[in-house]
Image (cartoon, rainbow, N blue to C red):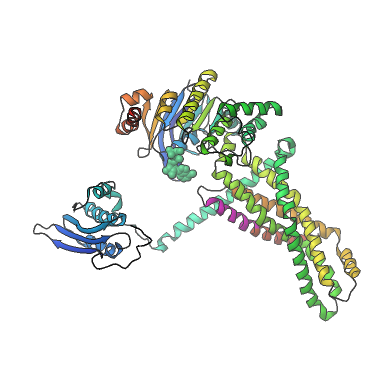
């Protein structure tokens, strides 16, 4: 039983179609990575999976629930299973990090204040931000904001985590640490990850399967495990993308 | 090349040259020369354009050996020619281009450049424009109605479950919109009262009725000017601020983050702000009334009446119903200003100028709606004797 099932999805803005007739499945507990050049619609796809962009055609199921055409109650039930990190973090600018991470707990749990604070602190430490609890987002670097956003996305222990370019702008050491965290969470808690990333090291670390989107074709041009795509690229674009890795490894 | 220093006059050998010749086999040969850069290429642009459209040679060779400098604009000229020749099925060659320039030119696919942007006559598009404008107004109207519906539902929810309201945000909005606005509201209302008193004194002096200036100022402030001036100041201060705050959150995806957490932006962002402002606006209007009446009293000092006469007149004319009708109005104005500010913030589009545009729209729409609402309520109150 796939945890996300997408059938003939078409998304876009106004009259403009970005992705057309896209179909794929994400299995429970896997690291599902979305690749593609910038502007090809990775963020758009992610936003449609979490119900933000209106879908022009096609259907999306989350487990047994259909997201497309869902009423408020069903939608809310589906959203509770998600954690989302937006491409730019999207932390609440008027709240400090602890308050940002605590907010979902305040709204959706009956824990007392002390327990909420405790959990929020734990999540911040998990992404390496211990000691920055009182800082405002504007006082942090972009990479730190992204990590705080990951902490916020995880605070309600979601079933599926959507991460939009989590390692862009991070140094290689922090980025590798994040990959390890993702693997641990997937293994220990069975969380499913849907991740947009360009970092080849991350892809090989966390991806059980990848799809590659393309702007001209407005759809998926390759699906498979990273190793399979590297060793037998189905087309030039995939070959070019993975050839970068050879260059990186040589260095 | 330093572009700041390049205002120097063009000398004869820098002047871009265009020499067209025809080979024996019918090949069109163009010799370009001089400096082909952004500032000088324009001399050739129109000429080259016309030429390539009228000349129908099958094969073109453009020679740039005589060109001493070639920048991006010069390359654009070559691409322009290439695109037109290729588009009608001809062949095109460039001679004398350096390897680097050749690689640069090869990055462009001439296909997309062949069509010129056609300038359509405006009248043909009129129906189209009218259609679009109508659709836009209809869309706008629909989102407004939807928003009012959502806001009402959110308030109903807030009344049912007061603990779900973010009270800390309510007090923050009340402080910023209310307490912080007090000095400016008092100042403006006081000055309006003063000016009103002077103007009306002038009108009443011939009848020896200057004492009734007190009645006029009182009535005008309580029923009309106190609430109205307060609301206009709030539209500029708080309506704009709400739109900017929420607009920035929209642009930063913070609103999207709220939605994916399953929180309603209207409950979470609009309700505390609307509530905070509406709680404060009657008090602000009350202060505006007071300041206006005191302003009128300042004018009274210049007359020969004792000060107590002024306040006697004020008290005798300040019936509770006048005060009340003004305060009712002020609450309606407050709801409008705060609602429009939040709505415009949530409607903010993408891009760097979007927040500014939303703020402007919030202030303009806020003031317009206040004045319209004032006219409607003023008329209704007159006829029902309130
Ligand atoms: N809110 C929007 N309105 C209109 N067009 C958009 C919007 N967001 C993104 N786009 C367009 O959709 C395309 C895909 O964008 P996006 O999904 O952000 O790409 P990626 O994340 O792969 O870099 C781009 O061409 C972009 O210009
Ligand atoms: Mg993106």
Please say whether residue B144 is visible from this viewpoint.
Answer: no
Left or right: where B75 falls relative to A171: left
- Whether residue B361 appears in magenta in the rendering, the answer is yes
Q: Is residue B316 above or below residue A45?
A: below
Q: Position of residue A198 (x, y in %)?
A: 41, 33
- Whether residue B205 appears in magenta in the rendering, the answer is no
Q: Quadrant of the C terminus of chain A?
A: top left
Residue in the picture at 50% in, 31% down: A163
Left or right: where B8 falls relative to B377: left
Q: Is residue B330 above or below residue A139?
A: below
Locate residue B312: give its quadrant. bottom right
Residue in the picture at 38% in, 23% down: A225
Q: Position of residue B143 (x, y in %)?
A: 58, 48
Along the line of sight, which residue is nearer the eye, B78 or A137?
A: A137
Q: Position of residue B2 (x, y in %)?
A: 35, 58
Q: Which residues are magenta?
A: B351-366
Along the line of sight, which residue is nearer the eye, B200 or A204?
A: A204
Please say whether residue B104 is visible from this viewpoint.
Answer: yes
Q: Is residue B4 above or below residue A88?
A: below
Residue in the picture at 45% in, 24% down: A206
Locate residue A196: give its quadrant. top left
Residue extending furthest toward the left: B24
Along the line of sight, which residue is nearer the eye, B89 or B142?
A: B89
Along the line of sight, which residue is nearer the eye, A78 or A151?
A: A151
Locate residue B202: give its quadrant. bottom right
Q: Position of residue B384 (x, y in %)?
A: 79, 59
Ligand 1's quadrant is: top left
Q: Main secondary structure of the magenta part?
A: helix
């Amino acid at each position: 039983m796939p945890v996300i099932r997408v059938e003939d999805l078409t998304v876009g803005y106004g009259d403009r179609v970005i992705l057309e007739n896209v179909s794929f499945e994400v299995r429970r507990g896997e690291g599902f990575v979305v690749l593609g050049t910038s502007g090809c619609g990775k963020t758009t796809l992610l936003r449609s999976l979490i119900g933000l962009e209106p879908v022009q055609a096609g259907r999306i199921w989350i487990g047994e629930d259909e997201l497309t055409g869902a009423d408020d109650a069903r939608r809310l039930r589906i959203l509770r299973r998600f954690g989302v990190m937006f491409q730019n973090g999207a932390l609440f600018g008027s709240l400090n990090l602890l308050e940002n991470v605590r907010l979902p707990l305040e709204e959706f749990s009956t824990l007392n204040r002390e327990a909420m604070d405790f959990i929020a602190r734990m999540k911040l430490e998990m992404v390496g931000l211990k000691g920055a609890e009182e800082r405002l987002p504007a006082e942090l670097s972009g990479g730190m904001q992204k990590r705080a956003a990951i902490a916020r996305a995880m605070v309600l222990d979601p079933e599926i985590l959507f991460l939009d370019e989590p390692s862009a702008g991070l140094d290689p050491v922090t980025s590798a640490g994040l990959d390890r965290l993702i693997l641990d969470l997937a293994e220990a808690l069975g969380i499913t990850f849907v991740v947009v990333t360009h970092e080849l090291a991350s892809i090989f670390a966390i991806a059980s399967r990848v799809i590659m989107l393309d702007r001209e074709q407005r759809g998926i041009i390759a699906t498979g495990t990273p190793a399979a795509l590297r060793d037998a690229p189905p087309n030039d674009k995939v070959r070019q993308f993975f050839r970068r890795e050879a260059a990186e490894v040589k260095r | 090349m330093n572009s700041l220093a390049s205002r120097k006059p063009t000398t004869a050998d820098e002047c871009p040259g265009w020499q067209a010749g025809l080979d024996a086999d019918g090949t069109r040969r163009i010799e370009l020369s001089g400096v082909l850069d952004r500032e000088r290429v324009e001399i050739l642009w129109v000429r080259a354009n016309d030429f390539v459209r009228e000349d129908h040679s099958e094969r073109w060779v453009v020679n740039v050996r005589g060109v001493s400098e070639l920048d991006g604009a010069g390359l654009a000229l070559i691409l322009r020619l290439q695109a037109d020749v290729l588009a009608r099925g001809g062949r095109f060659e460039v001679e004398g281009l350096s390897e680097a320039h050749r690689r640069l030119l090869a990055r462009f696919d001439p296909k997309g450049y062949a069509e010129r942007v056609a300038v359509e006559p405006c009248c043909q598009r009129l129906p189209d424009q009218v259609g679009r404008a109508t659709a836009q107004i209809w869309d706008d109207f629909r989102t407004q109605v939807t928003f009012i519906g959502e806001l009402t539902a959110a308030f109903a929810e807030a009344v049912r479950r007061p603990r779900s309201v973010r009270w800390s945000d309510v007090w923050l909005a009340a402080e910023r919109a209310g307490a912080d606005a007090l000095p400016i509201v008092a100042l403006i209302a006081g000055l309006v009262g003063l000016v009103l008193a002077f103007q009306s004194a002038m009108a009443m002096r011939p009848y020896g009725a200057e004492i009734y200036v007190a009645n006029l100022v009182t009535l005008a402030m309580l029923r009309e000017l106190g609430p109205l001036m307060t609301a206009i100041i709030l539209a500029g201060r708080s309506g704009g601020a709400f739109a900017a705050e929420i607009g920035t959150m929209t642009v930063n995806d913070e609103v999207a983050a709220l939605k994916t957490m399953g929180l309603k932006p209207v409950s979470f962002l609009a309700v505390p702000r609307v509530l905070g402002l509406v709680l404060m606006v009657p008090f602000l209007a009350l202060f505006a009334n007071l300041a206006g009446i005191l302003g009128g009293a300042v004018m009274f000092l210049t007359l020969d009446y004792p000060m107590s006469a002024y306040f006697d007149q004020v008290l005798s004319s300040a019936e509770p119903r006048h005060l009340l009708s003004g305060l009712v109005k002020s609450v309606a104005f407050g709801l409008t200003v705060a609602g429009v500010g939040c709505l415009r913030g949530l409607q903010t589009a993408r891009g760097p100028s979007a927040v500014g545009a939303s703020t402007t729209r919030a202030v303009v729409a806020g003031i317009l709606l206040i004045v319209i609402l004032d006219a409607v309520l003023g008329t209704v109150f007159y006829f029902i004797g309130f």
